[in-house]
Image (cartoon, helix red, strand yellow):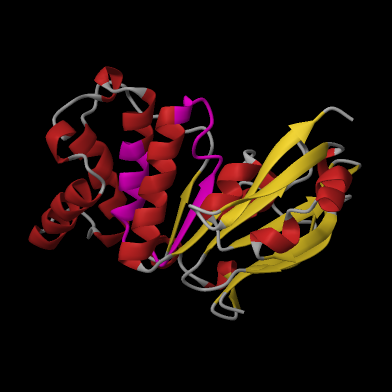
Amino acid sequence: MYFGFKNISIRYGEKEIVNDITMDFPRGKTTTIIGANGCGKTSLLKTISRAVSPKKGEVVFKNKPLDHYRPKELAKKIAYLPQIHYSPSDIDVKTLVSYGRYPYRQFGKGLSEQDREVIQNTLNLTGLKNLEDRTLDHLSGGERQRAWIAMTICQEPEILILDEPITYLDIGYQLEIMELIKSLGEKLNITIIMVLHDINLAARYSQHLFSIKDKKIYAYGDPRFVITEERLSDIFNIKAQIYEDNRNACPFIIPEKR
């Protein structure tokens, strides 16, 4: 297994969240996890950052459990951006992005020339060069999220994990951020794993989907396979018309009342 969850079960007290889940994420592709609220999507991602300890099972990277890697070694390979993140609002964009170089810094030393070069390349790649001196409290929500994603990219990871990266953004910024994520995946050839609530955006920007229902993997594969009327009814308890988005080569749903 290149990267994924192996036989993971998660429990909060007496409440079981997921039971014996295995997900093997395809290398170099974008995969999105979908499912109803409370099905365990975010809890699964939190096992990667070790914010949640599974009752059973493990997260695997290159056929080894994550706890076999030193934290700094792992941070050079896997970047994780949680749904909620905090930093002082008076720091500037360039400083925030530079935090991504932490795994590469030697004790007691500042940024190296290579670090500075990576930071500048990241600012250019993510369209933040003109905003690098602006503080976070003077950014729009979309610009701020772009800066946070840039910080993760500055780690030069093989794998980028994003938990609901477009929450709280209007539709314009949602599309902007999703286009950025797509561009980064293509230009950097990295593996991207996301949790999204918007089924249409998940279908449009992912090569693969995992759906969770009743604590188990319900369906996995190409968006056209996962997104069907029957499966949407089972997962979300909705009726939906499904069309083909010919421009973006993906399914598109219009939900209806049951």
Residue 119 belongs to the span the image colors magenta: no
Q: Nearer the viewer, residue 140 or 199?
A: 199
Q: Is residue 178 left or right of residue 101?
A: right
Placement of the N terminus among the 4 image quadrants: bottom right
Query: How many marks are shown on the rendered structure?
Result: 0
Residue 73: image location, x then y, percent: 40, 67
Residue 64 versus residue 94 in the image, above or below: below
Q: Write the residue at 66% across / 52% down.
A: 33
Q: Write the residue at 84% across / 36% down.
A: 238
Q: Is residue 60 visible?
A: no
Q: Write the residue at 32% across / 46% down.
A: 151
Residue 243: image location, x then y, percent: 67, 48
Placement of the C terminus among the 4 image quadrants: top right
Residue 248 versus residue 29 in the image, above or below: above
The image quadrant that residue 63 belongs to is bottom right
Residue 239: image location, x then y, percent: 84, 38
The image quadrant that residue 175 belongs to is top left
Q: Is residue 161 left or right of residue 257?
A: left
Start-end of magenta stretch: 146-171
Q: Nearer the viewer, residue 65 or 25?
A: 25
Q: Is residue 246 left or right of residue 128?
A: right
